[in-house]
Image (spheres, grey):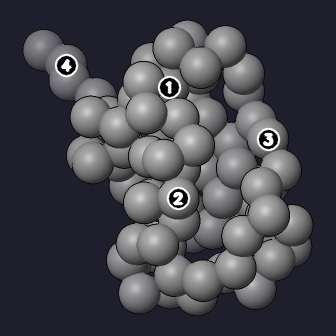
Amino acid sequence: MPRVVYFSVLRDRLGLSEEEVQFRGSVSKLREFLKEKHPEVADILDRVKFAVNEEYVGEDYNLEGDERVAIIPPVSGG
């Protein structure tokens, strides 16, 4: 099972830093899966980047089941 790791506002709103999910498929489908599972952060999930095993990946990247998936929310700075 992929281990999904949450950072920043996602971690704060969900009240958890990581979870294992029963999922296989593309990153774009994982985004939709997580939006259904956690509707309270769906707006943020629309704008995040994904890194798999510490490398940024595109929406078409396929998860096989044992990866570490970091979800990186948008950041702002000044």
Residue 54 lies left or right of residue 18; in this view the side is: left
Q: Distance between the residues labelled 2 and 4?
A: 30 Å
The disc labelled 4 sits on which kind of residue? Gly
Residue beneath disc 3: 19
**Secondary structure beneath disc 4?**
loop
Which mark is first along the chain, 4 or 2? 2
- Residue at horizontal 20%, vertical 23%? 76
Q: Distance between the residues labelled 3 and 2?
A: 13 Å
Q: Do callouts 3 and 4 mark residues in contact (Cβ within 8 Å)?
A: no
Label of residue 33 in the image = 2
Q: Do callouts 2 and 4 mark residues in contact (Cβ within 8 Å)?
A: no
Nearer-the-camera pick, 78 or 33? 33
**Secondary structure beneath disc 3?**
strand
Q: Do callouts 3 and 1 mark residues in contact (Cβ within 8 Å)?
A: no
Which mark is first along the chain, 1 or 4? 1
The image quarter containing residue 5 is top right
Inspect this view and state whether residue 51 appears: yes
**Secondary structure beneath disc 1?**
helix
User: Looking at the picture, how far across and down is residue 37, in whole percent?
Assistant: 57, 43
- Residue at horizontal 61%, vertical 35%? 6
Q: Distance between the residues labelled 3 and 1?
A: 12 Å
Which mark is first along the chain, 1 or 3? 1
Q: How crowded is mark 3: few (under 14 residues within 10 Å), some or many (20 or more)?
A: few
Residue 8 lies left or right of residue 21; in this view the side is: left
Residue beneath disc 1: 10
Quarter of the rendering occupied by the C terminus: top left
Residue beneath disc 4: 77
Q: Nearer the viewer, mark 2 or mark 1?
A: 2
The disc labelled 2 sits on which kind of residue? Phe
